[in-house]
């Protein structure tokens, strides 16, 4: 069952912002880490510095105004309200494109690419179920495959009987699900995280690129998968702490912007502090710690990696967590029509390298037809 799109305005009550101030002032911090880097997690001094800025200098209303300057909507799909931004291009030859974020991101990942991309595309940018202003699933089943079906329903409801799809992180998994489902409306996909497994029979003669990709993923496996295991197995337990502590929620998220980006050791070399906190606020203000984490619980137990036969494009940024060589990728993506390996950038490509991201999408979809 699909509803009708309803205009939506973001209007956070001042009481919520006052409550945030109170909680920030009452934060109880742990002792300092016993190493001089991020090896035990996000450092105490940095967390306290960001928290002080959050309390004294950060302005949520600035972000709220910027979001409300865009056309925001809600639509009911399968009993759940989905929030989305819908920017129609003034270009008569524009083509529809749905952009999907991941965790710990949000629609704000795309805020700097909306302007240039809307010159050529009608943009649909939804918040994942359980994230930001979308509804929170109240029953099992909202895996990436279900979201892929919902996104197809969304595009059809908006009058787009043919469209392109793009994503990174969970957005990549959703986009790949759309491609694998191949229901007839999606004409092609682009991902900046290539989801798949290296084939066993190609592991004996590795290229330098493949060795580097495996080393990066091994770091992730050895040092950075704890969050994923927790969110996939006990998201509810995690939620109690993060829902009660804004600093806890902030630290849980900002650690990933450090470890997953091409930031030379500090996230604020590529992301502004305001942009980082804007993203955190979409989790905090919507009490989305547990509901966003449940996407791992919904998806990891049913995750599929079916072959994708529709035209596909892949942009590989060097600090991405998962990078497949082209020969590895071709075992799943059966019709790769665009492939590029970028010189800089990481997991949050649209937010980290917006100009390169726009160039990649134009190059990829420019060679596809609806």
Image (cartoon, rainbow, N blue to C red):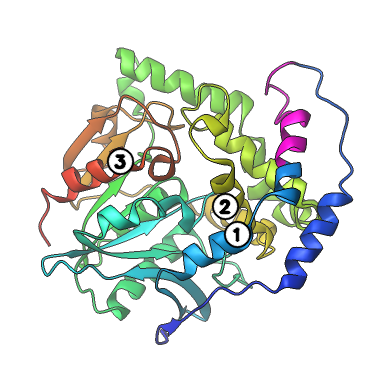
State which region is magenta: 36-50
Residue at 64% x, 35% y is 255
Quarter of the image where one finds residue 162? bottom left
Front residue of 176/270: it is: 270
Pointers 2 and 1 in contact (C-beta within 8 Å):
yes
Q: Position of residue 13 (x, y in %)?
A: 70, 74
Q: Marks 2/1: CA distance?
A: 5 Å
Question: Is residue 43 inside the magenta stretch?
Answer: yes
Q: Helix, strand or loop at disc 2? A: helix
Please say whether residue 180 is visible from this viewpoint. no
Pointers 1 and 3 in contact (C-beta within 8 Å):
no
Q: Position of residue 117 (x, y in %)?
A: 26, 55
Relative horizontal placement of residue 225, taking residue 319 as reference (left or right): right
Front residue of 217/298: it is: 217
Residue lying at the far front in this picture: please name it: 57
Relative vertical location of residue 70 with respect to residue 245 in this rendering, above or below: below
**Quarter in which the C terminus is drawn:** bottom left
Looking at the rendered structure, which numbered label has been put on residue 282?
Answer: 1
Relative vertical location of residue 155 with respect to residue 189 in this rendering, above or below: below
Tell which circle, 1 or 3, labels the residue nearer the N-terminal end: 1
Q: Marks 1/3: CA distance?
A: 24 Å
Q: Determine crowd level at label 2: few under 14, some 14-19, many 20+ residues with C-alpha closer than 10 A.
A: many
**Quarter in which the N terminus is drawn:** bottom left
Q: Position of residue 225 (x, y in %)?
A: 61, 34
Relative horizontal placement of residue 279, taking residue 37 as reference (left or right): left
Quarter of the image where one finds residue 49? top right
Front residue of 54/184: it is: 54
The residue at which mark 2 appears reads as: 279
Q: Helix, strand or loop at disc 3? A: helix
Q: Position of residue 349 (x, y in %)?
A: 39, 40
The residue at which mark 3 appears reads as: 355
């Amino acid at each position: 069952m699909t509803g009708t799109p309803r205009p939506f305005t973001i209007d956070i009550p001042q009481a919520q912002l006052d409550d945030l101030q109170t909680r920030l002032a009452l934060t109880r911090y742990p002792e300092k880490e016993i190493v001089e880097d991020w090896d035990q997690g996000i450092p105490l001094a940095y967390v306290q510095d960001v928290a002080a800025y959050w309390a004294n200098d950060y302005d949520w209303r600035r972000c709220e105004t910027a979001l409300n300057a865009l056309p925001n909507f809600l639509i009911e799909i399968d009993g759940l309200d989905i929030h989305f931004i819908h920017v129609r291009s003034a270009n008569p030859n524009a083509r529809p494109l749905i952009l999907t974020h991941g965790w710990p991101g949000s629609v704000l990942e795309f805020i700097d690419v909306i302007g240039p991309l809307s010159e050529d595309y009608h943009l649909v940018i939804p918040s994942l179920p359980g994230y930001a202003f979308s509804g929170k699933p109240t029953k099992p089943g909202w895996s990436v495959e279900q979201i892929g079906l919902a996104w197809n329903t969304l595009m059809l409801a908006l009058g787009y009987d043919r469209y392109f799809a793009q994503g990174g992180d969970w957005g990549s998994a959703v986009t790949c699900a759309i491609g694998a489902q191949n229901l007839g409306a999606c004409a092609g996909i682009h991902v900046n995280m290539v989801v798949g497994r290296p084939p066993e029979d190609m592991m004996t003669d590795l290229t330098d690129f493949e060795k580097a990709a495996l080393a990066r993923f091994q770091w992730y496996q050895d040092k950075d998968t704890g969050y994923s295991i927790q969110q996939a197995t006990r998201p509810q337990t995690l939620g109690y702490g993060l829902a009660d502590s804004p600093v806890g929620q902030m630290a849980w998220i900002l650690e990933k912007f450090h470890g997953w980006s091409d930031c030379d050791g500090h996230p604020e070399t590529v992301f502004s502090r305001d942009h980082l906190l804007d993203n955190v606020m979409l989790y905090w203000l919507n009490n989305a710690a547990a509901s966003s984490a449940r996407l791992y619980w919904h998806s990891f137990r049913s995750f599929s990696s079916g072959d994708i036969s529709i035209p596909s494009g892949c942009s590989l940024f060097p600090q991405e967590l998962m990078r497949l060589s082209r020969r590895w990728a071709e075992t799943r993506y059966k019709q790769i029509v665009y492939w590029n390996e970028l010189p800089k950038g990481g997991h949050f490509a649209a937010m980290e390298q917006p100009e390169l991201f726009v160039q990649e999408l134009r190059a990829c979809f420019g060679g596809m037809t609806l």
